[in-house]
Amino acid sequence: MSFAMYRRLKAVVDSWRREEQGKAKVAAAALYGLLAWLVLFAAAAFFVPAYAIPVSVVVFLAWIAFVAAMLRKHIGFSEKP
């Protein structure tokens, strides 16, 4: 009985650890993606000022989709209790 309880608690702690590691990966990737978005926005504003706003909106939406994909990949959907 105690071994079964130990294994269940270990599984819970391991899942928390995987979730925290996944959050760290997602946060780092999101930050790098946001920096890339800022660089693209600055480049668009400098080289093609007329299209700076549409380019920034499209790239920002792509960044949101990227972060959502990273969340799904590294954290996944939580199980229903």
Image (cartoon, grey):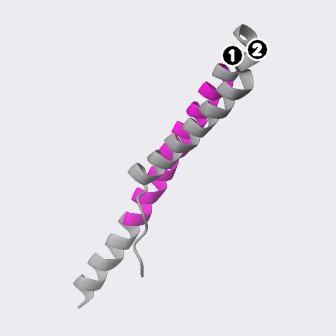
State how far apart marks 1 and 2 are (Cα). 6 Å
Q: Secondary structure at mark 1?
A: helix
13 shown above or below 33: below
Are there few (<14), some (14-19), or many (20+) residues within 10 Å of tag 2?
few
* Amino acid type for the residue under numbered disc 2: Pro
For disc 1, the marked residue is 44
Q: Is residue 80 above or below residue 48?
A: below
Q: Which corner quadrant holds the C terminus?
A: bottom left
- 59 drawn magenta: no
Amino acid carrying label 1: it is Ala
Q: Residue placed at 26% from the left, 88% from the top?
A: 2
Q: Quadrant of residue 63?
A: top right
Are the residues tagged 1 and 2 within 8 Å (C-beta)?
yes
Of residues 77 and 55, the one nearer the viewer is 55
> Which badge, 1 or 2, is on the more N-terminal residue?
1
Give the numbered dot on residue 58. Answer: none
Give the mark count: 2
Q: Quadrant of residue 17?
A: bottom left
Q: Which residue is mark 2?
A: 49
Extreme-bottom residue of the structure: 1
The image quarter in which residue 51 lies: top right
The magenta span reads 15-39
Q: Please give the name of the residue rendered at 38% of the width and 72% of the height, measured from the top-left corner.
A: 12
69 shown above or below 55: below
